[in-house]
Amino acid sequence: MKAVVKKQQTVDSIVKSFEGAAAIYLLNYEKMPVEIDSQLRRSLKAKGVKYIAVKNTLLKRVLTKMQISGLDEYLKGATSVMVGFEEDPLLPAREIEAFHKANPDFLVAKSLFLEGKVRPGSDVVNLSKIPDRKGMLAQLVTIILGPGSTIAGQIKTLTEKLEKEAGATA
């Protein structure tokens, strides 16, 4: 009976730590050396990304309690989980891709749950290319100011040219 209670407490603890999750990334961390895993964990913690390795049976209970379905078929082998929170649900995708570029043999994405849909792990590559909110705002400002700065430059050039012409004729 104590083992059941302990498992339920573990499930409840994981569910609580995943509160506010907007995306769940399932990864295969099989054969990853401890040193690389430790570096990854430190890096993710510093960036506020939740990352845990958990037994598939417990993870299945966690997902059920969170009312997330469709991921059971991916709960095979060594599974770790990254959670993307509402502020930036794609941050784990960018972190997975950056890690995978440096360590191509480790941390393969199995699947992910985003916007209420199960997606294949291969979507991580495309999702990682989408900039965060700050990057999107910077792109938007560039787009908005682009034509305006061009017009302003042309007006300034035309004004200087007219002033030179007016000074030459006077």
Image: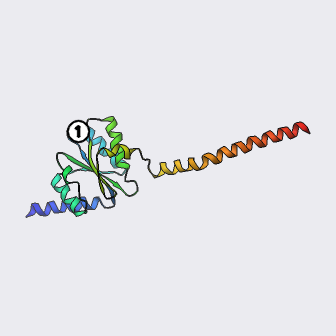
**Which quadrant would residue 6 be assigned to in this image?**
bottom left
**Residue ID at (23%, 43%):** 29
Q: In front here: 25 or 5? A: 25
Residue 36 position, x and y percent, is 27, 38
| Left or right relative to 89: residue 106 | left
Q: Mark 1 highlights which residue?
A: 32
Query: Looking at the image, which residue sits at the far left?
Result: 1
Label 1: element kind: loop
Q: Is residue 58 visible?
A: yes
Q: How are the colours assigned in the image?
A: rainbow
Q: Position of residue 151 (x, y in %)?
A: 68, 46
Q: Residue at x 48, y 51 (%)?
A: 134
The quarter of the picture where the N terminus appears is bottom left
In the depicted view, which residue is nearer to us: 158 or 87?
158
Callout 1: 10 Å neighbours few (<14), some, many (20+)? Answer: some
Residue 70 at x, y = what percent? 23, 56
The residue that appears at 20% across and 38% down in the rendered structure is 31
Going by the numbered disc 1, the residue's amino acid type is: Met
Q: Is residue 79 above or below residue 69?
A: above
Residue 24, visible in the rendered structure = no
Residue 167, above or below 67:
above
Counting the numbered discs, the total is 1
Q: Where's residue 73, x and y in %?
A: 19, 51
If the image is split into quadrants, where does the C terminus sit?
top right
